[in-house]
Image (tube, coloured by chain):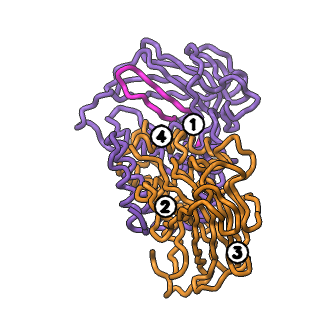
Chain colours: A purple, B orange
Amino acid sequence: MRNFDEHNITDAALDRFRDTPDARLKQIMTSLVQHLHDFVRDIELTFEEWELAINFLTRTGQISTNKRQEFILLSDTLGVSMLIDAINHRMPAGATETTVLGPFYVQEAPELPNGSDLSQGLEGEPLYVEGSVEAADGTRLANAIIDVWHSDKDGYYDVQRPDLDEPTLRARFRANADGRFRFWSIQPASYPIPSDGPVGQMLAATRRHPYRPAHVHFRISAEGYETLITHVFVAGDRYLDSDAVFGVKDALISDFKREAPGVGPDGRAIPTSWRRLTYRFGLKPLTVDPAATTDH
Amino acid sequence: MRNFDEHNITDAALDRFRDTPDARLKQIMTSLVQHLHDFVRDIELTFEEWELAINFLTRTGQISTNKRQEFILLSDTLGVSMLIDAINHRMPAGATETTVLGPFYVQEAPELPNGSDLSQGLEGEPLYVEGSVEAADGTRLANAIIDVWHSDKDGYYDVQRPDLDEPTLRARFRANADGRFRFWSIQPASYPIPSDGPVGQMLAATRRHPYRPAHVHFRISAEGYETLITHVFVAGDRYLDSDAVFGVKDALISDFKREAPGVGPDGRAIPTSWRRLTYRFGLKPLTVDPAATTDH
């Protein structure tokens, strides 16, 4: 087949995937080509715009490292990540809502004993976090594994701070026999997503602000349950209604309650005001009666 | 706005582009988000598939260099490049058909006098190319600038051969007062596009062959005319009907006529058989009566 025009080239491209042995891959590539061609036709993309797009995508790949993932940021800021989250997490009652992984998750966080302090001496308002991990039916999940990561008081993650060599404000905990975990850290801040790369240029060119409301990330896994990826957001944050990555859900907003100076829950003396977050996490069993699942 | 589900998140994402000052950018981003979300919804992309896609795109950026452009290759193999070509080059009668730029164009090719030999001693069947550059109405375009580049006898470009430091099988010529140019080189071969990267993995996973029919690239510019980007393909090539990047058009296929050993058109003695390509290139004026423009 030759002499493609702007109409028949789509059929020609689709036809090239006819022998794809993996049925799912064939479905994905077929849908991708159809939608991508429809997009190009709809806006009649010029050659110069195509060159800009090639350059944008190339730079998005090239600025990515093992500490920065610009394509995840692009997916997040276009609402694609939360769309995928919504499609794949139709949650039963009692299960915690999910949200984006974000670009700052690092797999090799250190495992620490309950009660540890993640702040490693970083300045900030002390934060005490106490959580419980349950099945949607209320069963406490002993030995659940909890990964936690969050920003410093200025909104930066450890991987963004060249002065920090060691994992900071991030760790892994194991729930106790009662499904509980607890740790000290510092209060996170709202912050701009990294804006010195292609995604930042896209946000600036479209007059979008890059801010996310303050939050703590949690990734919680337990045998027999779907791994939960979520945040808990700080109630009252000014960016709750305009999160640059569309990640906020009402049920994930919690009071990070300010407490007076004195003695902490574990007997620690605290000369300043401090914050306390208490949150119950509900996990979804790996097999769920479809009738009990609802869109959220 | 919060609590996005798989339906309302698209409106929320579209709304974020409401203040984009550049109307064209707003149109592009709006259409992109709509089509991208429709794609994700249609196939219900899983989180694991999204992670594979993020990884694929990142590697596609990271393998790209100033000598290799994997995102162009991806665009080419999905039929997107030729779709953009078709949309933007509705040609008047007499103008040469266009095709993809391809990933091997290099801007800083040396300018050589007419009659030069591009082969720099590389082995291969000698090829004599004589071309003319005209306006669609037949006016010869003196001083048109002709960039030419093509593969060696094994299908490799100079930028793919670590043994070649200098531009080889590529050069820039200037048409003479009569709009003509000519040069010696060697006969190009059909070849696989680079298949050691993400695009090659995509082709392998979908059982597509990576071959392009043998061709010579031309990029021809002249003041007052649209720059012409095209190839001339070797008639009879086995891949003319299945070009991996959809670039073939009948009018771009030409006989690379085999000639007997003896004396070349410029008096050069040729002890072996050799090839001769004669081609007329027609350029489209920058302003064309819309009534004279047709889809091709």
Give the image quarter of residue A139.
top left
Q: CA distance from mark 2 to mark 1?
A: 50 Å
The residue carrying mark 4 is: B201
Which is nearer the eye, B22 or A266? Answer: B22
Which chain is mark 4 on?
B
Position of A273 relative to A69 (above/below): above
Position of A117 relative to A82 (above/below): above
Q: Please report contact status of discs 1 and 3: CB closer than 8 Å, yes or no.
A: no
Which is nearer the eye, A83 or B110? Answer: B110
Q: Sequence-wise, which precedes: disc 4 or disc 3? A: 3
The residue carrying mark 2 is: B247
Whether residue A101 is visible, yes or no, is yes
Magenta stretch in the rendered image: A213-231
Give the image quarter of residue B165.
top right
Q: Residues within 10 Å of mark 2 (few under 14, many from 20)?
A: many
The residue carrying mark 1 is: A215
Q: CA distance from mark 4 to mark 1?
A: 38 Å
Q: Sequence-wise, which precedes: disc 2 or disc 4? A: 4
Q: CA distance from mark 2 to mark 3?
A: 24 Å
The x and y percentages for residue A132 are: 45, 22
The x and y percentages for residue A251 are: 44, 39
Q: Amino acid at mark 4?
A: Gln
